[in-house]
Structures are given as structure tokens and as C-alpha cells.
Image: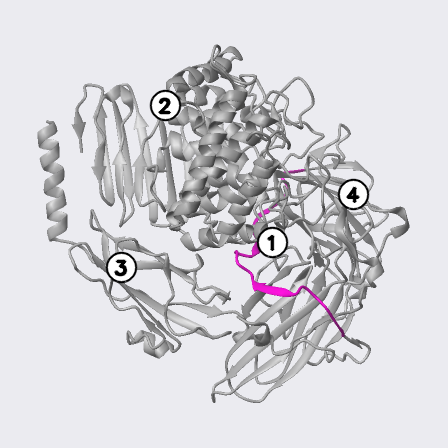
Amino acid sequence: MRRWFALFIIGISIATELGAQPIEAVNLRCNYRINPLGIDESQPILTWEIKSESKNVLQSAYRIIVSDDPSLIAKGVGNIWDSKKVSTNPQGQVYYEGSPLQSAKKYYWRVMIWDKNGRSSSYSKTAYWQMGLLDKNDWDNAHWIAYDILPDSNIFLPLVHGNGKKEWGKRPNVLPLFRKTITIKKTVKSATAFICGLGQFEMYVNGNKTGDHFLDPGWTQYSKHAQYVTFDVTNQIRKGENAIGVWLGNGFYYIPGERYRKMTGAYGYPKLIAKFFIEYADGSSEAIVTDSTWKTSASPIYFSSIYGGEDYDANLEQPKWNEANFKDTSWKNAVETDGPSMLHAQLSEPLKVFEQFTPVSRRQLKQHVWVFDLGQNFSGIPSITVSGRKGDTVRIIPAELLNDDGSVNQKGSGGLHVYTYVLKGDGQEQWQPRFTYYGFRYLQVENAVPDGITLKEGAPLIKDIRGMHIRNAAPLISHFSCSNELFNKTHALILWAIKSNMVSVYTDCPHREKLGWLEQTHLMGSSVQYNFDIAALNRKVIRDMMYAQYPDGKIPEIAPEYTRFTPPFDESPEWGSAAVILPWYHYLWFGDKKTLAEAYDMMKKYVAYLQNKSSDHILSHGLGDWFDIGPNRPGVAQLTPQGITATAIYYYDITILEKTATLLGKVADATRYRNLAAEVKVAFNKKFFNQTTKQYATGSQTANAMALYMGLVEERYQQDVLHNLITDIEQRGFALTAGDIGYRYVLRVLEKYGRNDVIYRMNNRSDVPGYGYQITHGATALTESWQAYPFVSNNHFMLGHLMEWLYSGLCGIRQVEGSVAFRTIEIRPQPVGDIKEAKAHYRSIQGIIAVAWKKDKERFSLEVSIPSNTTATIFFPEEYKKKPVKVGSGEYKFIVSAKKRLRG
């Protein structure tokens, strides 16, 4: 039977090869984005996928052509770059090597590929990218402009943690509107806007908002740099009179001294810089830039805070302020000012509005006070449509939780955060905040009633109310489901925390802090990567860390570092090590050697900083295994000494640096780090390992798991330490204790050593703190504490490590150790417990990897899809005692019976 099966497969492969289907390069991306605007690198990264109906497809060569003329590229002519035929197997990660690229110019490109038999594809469909502004001079003397200039004495930097000093007062400010009229006399070929408005902006051309972005630009360390956003406005510009309008918000650039604020301070008042580059059909061009000729006025937003909410008075609106025929004689001229010294094109996807939630229930608390339940905890803003009298004022208070009396509870999420809308009394009025957001499930609406409720007082009527979810627009690239409903709910629980905290940084929570806590980038990185295409966002976060690094090499726990926390919240090795681990993981996921090389100096400086902080190679400072489960209220590690986690991750950093140095050809560095790692390993084991008990330090789950994962355990003791880890879990009734730092490594080690049954038993339950416990207690997004405490965040990013296992363990989608960019895949599904079937797909940079398995008493069936230009080894559950099968790209189905028979 086995011989027949082998011949059957070989026959299919030969037939497939002989009748080979065409191959095609698809999903062309520049700097990991499809048709991006605003590329300010001289050598963009070009990648693509390979589409083919054939099996065992491998690329043997490629040819890229680039043109600045769409008619030439359509003819297959690359007048800017023709790579000619390049013999290489990996597709993508090609660095542009053509003629020097020019600022603001659009370039078109196509790819031709050859398979392993030398057969070529036709050229791909045309893709493009548009350049940003490569040099400061390319801004054509554009100036930063503002409504007013904040006196130097009122600039508070770094931002102050907390409410600031009482004498600073409320510090109200004007959120301004800007406008500029321009006359177009020629036929427009193309028009591009390059714009940065701080803290946030919205842009309009002839009365219509440009794009669908939210909270542009992504936040950065404004004392060093800011991001500009590029828009194609060709279709918005017309012959004759045109108006450009820009609305500014505070963001993190200016935080007023009112309501709740995690931080207080100011870089300055909101400001704007922009260049509009117009190319005409006759070959000429024109640049319109920001300067003192622009006009400015106060907007209807009379309060806005990234932490405290937003207030809007519709009676202050100036209809058609962003249209050409508006009379702006009462507006004043903008003032020219200073801004961040460096401007970079926005690297990652923008924030956008995604799901919209309508109430699943409502409850009246008292007269004119109603609470609406949207059914899901998420990051976003409310949207309301009301009708009422001029001057009626509606307040909306969002929250994750409710008090016992049914009112909203902001105790764990930061309050007061509130939205206020003052009606103009003109029929139905729709409004939503522009420059802030929050994490919430419930909306408490005051001084209004749902439509259909009749009251003598005539309160405003709520015609419609909903929640608008906002997040980074990185594409969703996966799906997961299984026969275990608790695991499906756990997947959704974690996914909502990911979506709610994936903005222009990886935040911890979407309300109380909104800060980029760095440990999440590497501990949750794989969990996020299995769900979203985060390559572009990773590059932005890596840049944030490079700008946050201190001269002595220190990496703070947050980046951008808006405020300087006091120890132990200022610097902790488990957090700062993101500067080493994230660039390496990013390379492993995407093959991005360029970004790794750019980060190398940062990585070296940080490890040197840790080396200087160590004593006999041991580090013992920081937060340790944050929010583990111990006898006390969660916070700093309780069960694991800080030296364990800090030193283990320091050792891990060194091993990564050795690999990176080797990859980059830095032989002396590699040797130095190899020797340093050996010294740290000896010191770690001398300090923490008990040879009698075969335990590390306290023998906590985190201590033993991290020692195993980082490769610190000598081979002769590995099984003993693993046994102790599992014994601790068993003796606690399969309850977890590890926290933010340790739990990922507990899962990674158990999966590596084939103890997925233990992972299942730890997480397939609701009676002890964990995912099921949170769900049972009403959570719809992952909470900050395993115990789902109401006094902390209930939409938090940091504990979602099981997401990675659902894809890599339960469904078995992973890459072979040593593989890069999923070129060599391993399919190793793990049917555990009562799970009878599971399926998942993940779109790697090579293409879609899909797995679906089912199990019954008689057999195990497995369906697998492997993308072109990769190979895979498929493993079967141990109880079937079937040897692994090696395959190339294609779709496969296997059925393994309990009688050790294999059919395909």
C-alpha cells in the first residue's frame, strides 16, 4: 500500500510537471506595501508572490523593469531600471538598483520570473510606487505654520508623568483650521500632497476630505522627528479656483491640563507643514507650500485631548470653510514657526475605521441618562446622530465596564474621558470625534433620549448611535477555527486586544496609556504576525527605538519616550531587549536583511549597555515577570527573581547578535559575542541553577521555561528541568503562574518538547485565572490581568501568547528552525484533548500556508496548501507512527488510519 501511494504521488508529480501551468508574479509590494505613496528611500525593497496551479514550483530567476512612463512599462520597457535576468531562487527582498530616484516622482514596475525548469512567465501586472521628498530642499522652502506660537516657557518636555503642576492650569488651546486658495489654469497631469500636521490632521480639497485615514500622522518622538503623509489629490484638483483646507488636533504634541491625562506637557501648539506638487500636461510643474499667506481660524472643537476626549460646538461651524468661494476676510494670516528638524515619510499603514458596532441593548439610569451596550470592547470613537434645539448639549462617556448601578466605570481605563456635542438645532446632526479615541464597550449618553421615547422636556433625540473601531490598516492575513469553542473564543479575545492596540505603535491599552511598551513587540510579535501583515509597522517601531536610544545605549521601556518614568519603569532588560529581538524576528519573518543591518548599531550599543550594567555577567534590575500570579496584587514579578528574566534575555540578545554579526559578515564581532555568551551562560548557571533539585532559582514556571528556551540549560539537564516545569504545572492543577514575560516561553518550551497536551489542559478551562476565566467573567477583549480585575485595563495586549500556539502548535504552521521568510516550512499539527478538527491559514511573505485537519477514532485526515517557491515537511501525530513527508508547493490531502495505512 505504501509503495502504491509513493508511486501514485510520483505519477501525479510527473504529470503535473509535463502539463505545467503558467507561473505568474503577483501581489507586488514596495517596502511591504501595495502601490505605496511617499517612499523616501533611495533603494526601496521590492517583493512579490508566485502564483501557479502546478506543484513543486521553484523560482530560478527574475527580471524587474522600472519605468517613469506607464506607456513604456506597458510595452515591457524599463527606462529607469532593467535588472535583466538575475538567477536566484528567493523571490523578493530585491533592492532597487536603477537610476537615481527623484523626489515626488511615480515609478511603475513589473516582474518576470523563471521556474526551476527554465520556463518564464509573462510580465506581471503593473504596480507602482511614488517617491516622497528625499531631501530637505525638496520641500521648496515650505514653512511650519500655526495659529499661534506657544511661548518657550510653556513648553514642557519631556512630558510630565501625571497631571503636572497646579500652577500650569488648564492650558486651553485653539484647534485651528487652515485654508489656501489656488488657481489652476492648465490641465493637471498629477497632483500630490506631502503633509504633516501635528499632533494630528485632516486635509480637505474643495470641501472633500482627502483619504480615509484617522489620526494622521503616526506618533513619533517629535523632539527628533515627525512623519509626513503623501496623498494623490489629482482627482480632487480642478481647473479654476481650488481650496485646500487642513484641520489640526493636539494628539501627543500638546496635552492640555484638563480631565484625565497619563502625561501632561507640550512640544508646542498644533502646527502644519505641507507641499502640494502639481504636474501639468504640458510638462511644467508648480509647488504650493505652507507659509504666512495661508489663512487660519479657530475650529468648532473647543477641547481635545488624546487622553481626555473631545468637545465640539456645532454653532461655531463655518460652513464651506474648505471651499474656494468661502469668504475668509475675518481669518488671520498663519504665523510661521519651527517644528521637528527631521521629516520622514509615514512608514506603516495609516489608522482607519473598520467595524461599526450598534447597541445590543440599552438601559435608562435616570431621566435623560441612558447606557448603551455595544457588545464588544474595542478601540474607537462613538458616532451619534441627534436632533434637538440649538444649544442643547449631549455628553457621551465611554467605558469598558459598568458599576453596580449600571453607570459606566472608567476607574481602570482613565477618567474623565468624555465627548461633548453642542447642537445647532438644524434637523438631524451627525457627529463623531476627530482627534482622540478610547477603549470601550459601553456608551453613557446624558441629556438625550433614544428616538421613540417621548418626554415633555423635549430632550434631544438619539436617531442613531454606534461605535467605530479604529486600528492600523495592516491587512488581516489569517483565519483560525477549531471544534473547541473555548479556544475559538480565546482566539477572538486575543484578536480584539491585538486590533485595539495596533495603531502607529504597539500600545498596551487603547485608553489609559496608549504608549508603546516595548516588551510586547517581541513577546507578542509572532501572535500578531500570524494575523496581520505587520512588516511596514515593524520597520516604524524599529525606527522609534533607534531614536529613543540614549547615548550610553539605554533603551527605555516605551518608544517614543514621551515621558521619563522613574525606576523600575524607566528601563528593564525584558523591555529594552526589543531593540535586539524585534529586528531579528523581523528578519526571520520577512527576510529583511536591510532593516536588520540598519538596526545593527542600535543592537550593539544596547548589549554593551547591559554588559556595563551587569555584575559578574548577572543583571538584576527591572520589572521582571510583570503581572505574574502570586500571593499579592499583580505588578512587579512575585514568583521569579528579576535576575532570572533579565539575565536570560540578556544572554538571548547576545546569541542573536552573534547570528546577526555572522549574517552581516562581521567576523570579529561574531567571535566576541560567541565568547561573551559562553561567559554569561556559565555565570547564569552558577548563580541560579541548583544541581540537586534541577531547578532554576525558585523553580517557577517562568524561571525554568526561560532557561530552557534561551538555551541556558546544559544538555544533560534539559529533560530534568522540563520535568520540573511540567511537575509545577501539574501540582497546581494545570494552572498557570507566569506573567507578561514568562508565559510565552512556557508555551514555546512545551510546544518544542512535544507537550502540547499540557498547553491544552492549562488553557481549556475557566475555573482558574487565564483566558477562559476572563471570558467567563464577561471579557470580550484580553484583559491586563489573568484574573480580569476591574481596577486595571480590560483591553490589554500583553498576555495573548496563546495566539501563537493556535497557529504554530494546534494547527502546526511554522517555519523550520534556521529558515528565513518561511522558505522552508514545517507542518506539525497537534490534535490534543477533545479537539476533533482545526483549520487555519496564514499568508506568509511567500504566500498562503493553509492547514485543515480532522480526527476520529479510525483516522486522521490532513489537508495542506504550500505556497510556490517553498518546501515543506509534513509531520503526522505520533500515535499514527507515520514518517514525515517532504513536499514542494501545491495542495495535498492525506488520510492516516489507526492501522498505519496512508492514502492520498
Neighbour tally class for label 2: few under 14, some 14-19, many 20 plus, Cα within 10 Å:
some
Q: Which residue is mark 3?
A: 24
Q: Position of residue 429 (x, y in %)?
A: 72, 59
For marks 3 and 1, give the CA distance.
Answer: 40 Å
Q: Quadrant of residue 65?
A: bottom left
Which of discs 4 and 1 lies nearer the camera? The answer is 1
Q: Position of residue 529 (x, y in %)?
A: 46, 43
Position of the N terminus, as image quadrant, is top left
Q: Which residue is mark 4?
A: 162
Identity of the amino acid at label 4? Gly
Queried whether the magenta region covers residue 551, the answer comes back as no
| Marks 4 and 3 in Cβ contact (< 8 Å) | no
Q: Quadrant of residue 506?
A: top right
For marks 4 and 3, give the CA distance.
Answer: 56 Å
Q: Secondary structure at mark 2?
A: loop
Q: Which residue is mark 2?
A: 754
Q: Position of residue 71 (x, y in %)?
A: 34, 79
Q: Secondary structure at mark 1?
A: helix
Identity of the amino acid at label 2? Gly
Which of discs 3 and 1 lies nearer the camera? The answer is 1
Write down the region rendered in magenta. Answer: 335-361
Neighbour tally class for label 1: few under 14, some 14-19, many 20 plus, Cα within 10 Å:
some
